[in-house]
Image: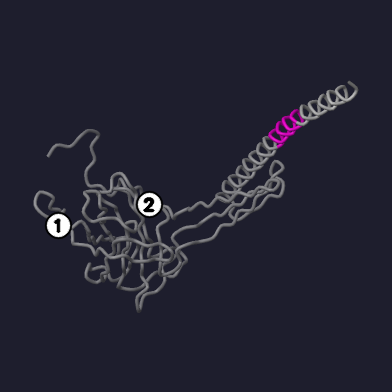
C-alpha cells in the first residue's frame, strides 16, 4: 500500500513537471515572437527614417550641391554631387519607350566641345528579337552649326528586317543585329557611321535619339565615340548619391539630373487637339 501511494505521488509530480514544461515552452515561444516582432518593427522604423534622411539629402543637394547633416531629426545624411558623361562612352540613364527622346551633348558652356567624326549608336536590351512589331527602331538627329543658323541632319535605323517591306515600308536603313557594350551595359543593336556623311562635321551642338515602335517596353540607348581622332564628350548632367543613416540602418538613393533641354513636343511639325485624318 505504501509503495502504491509513493508511485501515485511520483506520477503526480511527473505530470506537474511535464505540464510546467509545456507551459514554459509556450510562454518562451510567445516571448520570443514578441521580441522578434519588436525587433523587426524597430528595424523597419529605422530603415524608414534612414530612407527619409537620404531623400532629404537629395532635396538639399538639388539646391545647394554636395552637403551633409549629422542631425536630421535624429538621423544623418551625406549627399555627393558629381558630373557624368565626360568620356567617350555614355549610357543614357533612363530607358525609353516609343516617342521618347534622349539627348547627348557635344558642347557645353565652359567645357571643351567634342570633336570627331565616327560614332556608334547602341540601343535595345540584350536579347531583344528582330521579328516583333515592337522591336525598337531609332531616329538619330544631330544639331550643328552656329546658334544663329542651327541646322539638323537625320538618320533612321531599324533592326526589324520585315518592317521595311510591303505595307510596313518606312524607308529606314537596316541596323546591325549585333551586340555592343558600353561600360557594363550590353545592347542588342548598333550602327556605326560618319558624321561627314550626314553633312554635320563641324560646330556640333547636340544629338537626339528618338525610340520608335516599342510602345510597351522601354529600352536603353548609349553613345560610343571611342574612335581614333575623337575627343571626349562633355558632361551630360549630374548624379546625386545620397546616403541616409539612422541607428544601424543605412539607405542610399541615386538621382540623375540631366542638362535642361527643350521639351520634345516642340520637335513636332504638326499639333492638334483632336485626332488627325489624312
Which residue: 35% across, 78% down? 229
- Residue 57 left/right relative to 171: right
Q: Is 26 within the magenta?
A: yes
Which of the pair 63/8 is nearer the observer? Answer: 8
Q: Quadrant of the C terminus?
A: top left
* The residue positioned farthest toward the left in the image shown: 166
Which residue: 43% across, 66% down? 183
Q: Which residue is mark 2?
A: 95
* Distance between mark 2 and mark 1 Cα atoms: 25 Å
Residue 29, label in figure = none
Of callouts 2 and 1, which one flags the residue occurring earlier in the amino acid sequence?
2
Task: Give the image quarter of residue 14.
Answer: top right
Q: Is 198 within the magenta?
A: no
Q: What percent of the width, then of the height, locates residue 160?
A: 20, 56
Task: Give the image quarter of residue 119.
Answer: bottom left
Q: What percent of the width, then of the height, locates residue 53?
A: 63, 45
- Main SS, magenta region, reads helix
- Residue 11 left/right relative to 144: right
Q: What percent of the width, then of the height, locates residue 6?
A: 88, 25
Q: In this rendering, is residue 113 above or below 276?
A: below
- Residue 102 left/right relative to 268: right
Which residues fall within the magenta stretch? 22-35
- Residue 9 left/right relative to 223: right
Which of the pair 78/220 is nearer the observer? Answer: 220
Which of the pair 145/124 is nearer the observer? Answer: 124
Which residue: 72% across, 30% down? 26
Q: What percent of the width, then of the height, locates residue 220?
A: 36, 55
Q: Secondary structure at mark 1?
A: loop
Amino acid at each position: 500500500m505504501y509503495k502504491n501511494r509513493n508511485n501515485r505521488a511520483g506520477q503526480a509530480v511527473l505530470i506537474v513537471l511535464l505540464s510546467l514544461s509545456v507551459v514554459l515552452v509556450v510562454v518562451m515561444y510567445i516571448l520570443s515572437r514578441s521580441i522578434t516582432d519588436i525587433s523587426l518593427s524597430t528595424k523597419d522604423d529605422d530603415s524608414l527614417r534612414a530612407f527619409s534622411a537620404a531623400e532629404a539629402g537629395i532635396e538639399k543637394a538639388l539646391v545647394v550641391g554636395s552637403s551633409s547633416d549629422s542631425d536630421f531629426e535624429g538621423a544623418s545624411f551625406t549627399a555627393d554631387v558629381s558630373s557624368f558623361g565626360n568620356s567617350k562612352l555614355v549610357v543614357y540613364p533612363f530607358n525609353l519607350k516609343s516617342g521618347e527622346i534622349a539627348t547627348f551633348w557635344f558642347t557645353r558652356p565652359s567645357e571643351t566641345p567634342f570633336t570627331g567624326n565616327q560614332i556608334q549608336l547602341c540601343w535595345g536590351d540584350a536579347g531583344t528579337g528582330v521579328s516583333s512589331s515592337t522591336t525598337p527602331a531609332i531616329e538619330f538627329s544631330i544639331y550643328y552649326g552656329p546658334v544663329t543658323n542651327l541646322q539638323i541632319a537625320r538618320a533612321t535605323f531599324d533592326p526589324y528586317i520585315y518592317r521595311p517591306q510591303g505595307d510596313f515600308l518606312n524607308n529606314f536603313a537596316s541596323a546591325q543585329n549585333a551586340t555592343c557594350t558600353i561600360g557594363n551595359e550590353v545592347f542588342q543593336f548598333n550602327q556605326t557611321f560618319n558624321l561627314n556623311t550626314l553633312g554635320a562635321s563641324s560646330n556640333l551642338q547636340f544629338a537626339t535619339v528618338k525610340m520608335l515602335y516599342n510602345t510597351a517596353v522601354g529600352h536603353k540607348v548609349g553613345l560610343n565615340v571611342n574612335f581614333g581622332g575623337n575627343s571626349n564628350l562633355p558632361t551630360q548632367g549630374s548624379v546625386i548619391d545620397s546616403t541616409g543613416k539612422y541607428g544601424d540602418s543605412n539607405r542610399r538613393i541615386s538621382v540623375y539630373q540631366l542638362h535642361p533641354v527643350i521639351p520634345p513636343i516642340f520637335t513636332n511639325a504638326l499639333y492638334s487637339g483632336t485626332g488627325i485624318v489624312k
